[in-house]
Image (cartoon, grey):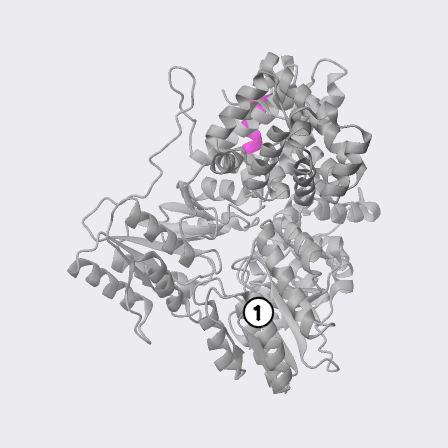
Amino acid sequence: MFDGLSDRLGGIFDKLKKRGALSESDVESALREIRVALLEADVALPVVKDFIEGVKERALGEEVIRSVTPGQMVVSIVHEHLVEMLNGGPVETDASDVPILPTGSGLNLVGTPPVAILMVGLQGSGKTTTTGKIAARLTTRDKKKVLMASLDVYRPAAQQQLVVLGEQTNVRVLNPVMGEQPVAIAKRAMQTGRLEGFDVVLLDTAGRLHIDMELMGEVSAIRDVAKPVETLLVTDAMTGQDAVNVAREFNEKIGVTGIVLTRVDGDARGGAALSMRAVAGCPIKLMGTGENIDALDNFDAGRVAGSILGMGDVVGLVEKARDAVDEEEAGRLAKRMMKGQFSMDDMAAQLTQLRGLGDMNALMGMIPGINKAKKQMAEANVNDKMIAHQEAIIRSMTKKERKNPKLINGSRRKRIAAGSGTSVQEVNRLMKQFKQMSTMMKKMGKGGMKSMMSGMIGGGGMPPGMMPR
Amino acid sequence: MGWLDRLKTGLGRTTEKLSGGITELFRGRKLDRAALDELEELLITADMGVSTATRLTDALAKTKFDQEVSADEIRATLAGEIAAILEPVTKPLEIDTSHKPFVVLMCGVNGSGKTTTMGKMAKLYKEQGHAVMLAAGDTFRAAAIEQLQVWGERADCPVIAHDQGSDAASLAFDAMGQARDAGSDILMIDTAGRLQNKNNLMDELKKIIRVIKKQDETAPHAVLLVLDSTVGQNAHSQVEVFSDMVDVSGLIMTKLDGTAKGGVVVGLAEKFGLPVHAIGVGESVEDLRPFDAREFADSMMGLSS
């Protein structure tokens, strides 16, 4: 797979560092790398060109040239600029320089109820699933009375799909009538909405190609009937260079008020988001982050910017960690670590928590700048099974041994290996790892979090923009 | 409208932009570095990816660098290069009748068009005189089973289905038995869409295959990865991971109508060399066509053949 931008730039700037000063042509070659990285992330070419122009000015500034780590400096400038573009403007900061993230990115529901929300997009972009998710969100979070209607009379069982989603989410779905045409369904949906006092009517349309004039005409007729306050363009985060055309056509023909980015949980870099944002000129409001009905979040520019640059998904990782880690346990562990009383039991507890986070490979993918480490781990065969083996090894130790691993001599190692169904080599490896960990913990006790992070990631993997400020 | 025309209109925008762009670019101009860079950019906008685009322009530079070249020449040379890359992967799906049933497993990410493609294929095979059975293996998405049942009616094929939410592997196991009992020639098994980075879902797909093998050691005889042509460079990751996990035997590109780019096929062919069995260029059954390298390359470059 592709290497992240930080790795790419790291290479260029590492060479330069030896020479000291940066020249303009160095910056040019860095910009070329940025360009390639963006193109590989599926950002559309015209958008890439604009973007590079924007970054160039900032990257040629004094601070980069004088910086000790120009590569990281450039990455953080690019990241910032990306976030700005995705958000549609500079991120404002409060007095203490903490960025204020736009929170009002929810849906516009202002109007006389029932307000209509029109869902449009290409085939297979995730419109119906997203409609279900939005309905669930509006019902449970915003306490709205929601009606869903499927206007997809083309794809077999599309209407049935929405009915099933309605059952799953306890949201009313307009009864499908055989042979009824989309515009008529829209009328009936709005009428039902008015008569039965619904707050929101969600209109799910059939997938259509933006160049299919007949179907584009149909959806604009639907728009004229329903007069939606929101017309949401549902787009797959995996979309390629064509994203610009899709956004432009839908916006020109129908008028889009917001974008919903789906399948953000995939491993696509999601450059389409930037293209669409730039071309349609309307905000990305929501993003789909999983298959469950509640997997719909407010758009997070930082997260998407990170994945476009291949910097990993720090936010997602933190969220996962928060879900999986028992805070009390973590607190207890941290205290013991600080005191340097790190035992095998603590290591076992950590391993268990690590496993609770889920699949190792997926996890590694979320950590920024870790591509190199990932390769090394793959080579060393670090995987979920290995963690399970390590747990088994620890469990095969006596209580005494776990408290005081120094006791573990050759014959004890043999016994532990036999008891855990592993080999002495594996036990040795674990012992070594334990030793490294406790040394690191002691260091952390002295030097704080930062030195541990650099110890873990192998130095310099973390771009500055990603460090908690 | 013939399907070739449809492919041409389908690739229309790409063609228009690519070939128009090339005409624009080489109006009385030498093939110098700047022109090559611009050409590379044009190719990238067709989703070919940076490395494939670079390779194509480098090949061009080798023979024509710093010469006066006409746009037609460029187009013809590029079409030739592209066709050469695509020819080795141009292979229709052969149904080996010594297997009874010949088992076809469909897989792909969400929304790529697995169920629709499978319905179209079923109808084609049925028309060719095969006894086809379908298995509604997407037990996850709401109404996916009903969607396949509609296709079953259209193609006049029996559809084996369990309830939504049931185990897809056990459905596959049942379908294998029923297809054998019914003496079907072809059994097509649908699966739920899954993103390739979800390991648990990929494991589920592996399980389906393990279970199929319990009924017939040689099955599945074809594992088809369905790719949406509008997808950009993530297609590489999809092919890589799915191949790794379930040994994909061939690709089907869908949604090549409209402005879908399809340039990604070139990159995929170069990198993975997996056969491209068919392309989808429209909504109707006739719009699922065998893949043809020369025609594809020519229509991409706006050459008539």
Residue at the spot x=71%, y=13% of the render? A21
Q: In this view, does B25 lie above or below A27?
A: below
User: Which of A355 and B72 lies nearest the eye of the viewer?
Assistant: A355
Q: Where residue B110 sits in the image (x, y, percent)? A: 53, 58
Asked whether B214 falls inside the magenta stretch, the response is no
Q: In which quarter of the image is the N terminus of chain A?
A: top right
Q: Where residue B99 sits in the image (x, y, percent)? A: 72, 80
Name the residue at the right extreme: B63
- In the figure, is residue A106 to the left or right of A322? left
Residue at the spot x=60%, y=44% of the render? A359
Asked whether A58 falls inside the magenta stretch, the response is yes
Q: Is residue B246 above or below residue B6?
A: above
User: Which of B36 and A198 lies nearest the eye of the viewer?
Assistant: A198
Residue at the spot x=37%, y=60% of the render? A165
- In the figure, is residue A101 to the left or right of B104? left
The segment highlighted magenta reads A51-59
Residue at the spot x=62%, y=79% of the render? B177
**For the residue carrying disc 1, how many other residues have a C-alpha within 10 Å: few (<14), some (14-19), or many (20+)?**
some
User: Which of A90 and A218 lies nearest the eye of the viewer?
Assistant: A90
Q: Where residue A27 sits in the image (x, y, percent)? A: 66, 23
Residue under label 1: B170
Tell me the subunit letter for badge 1.
B
Q: Is mark 1 on a helix, strand or loop?
A: helix
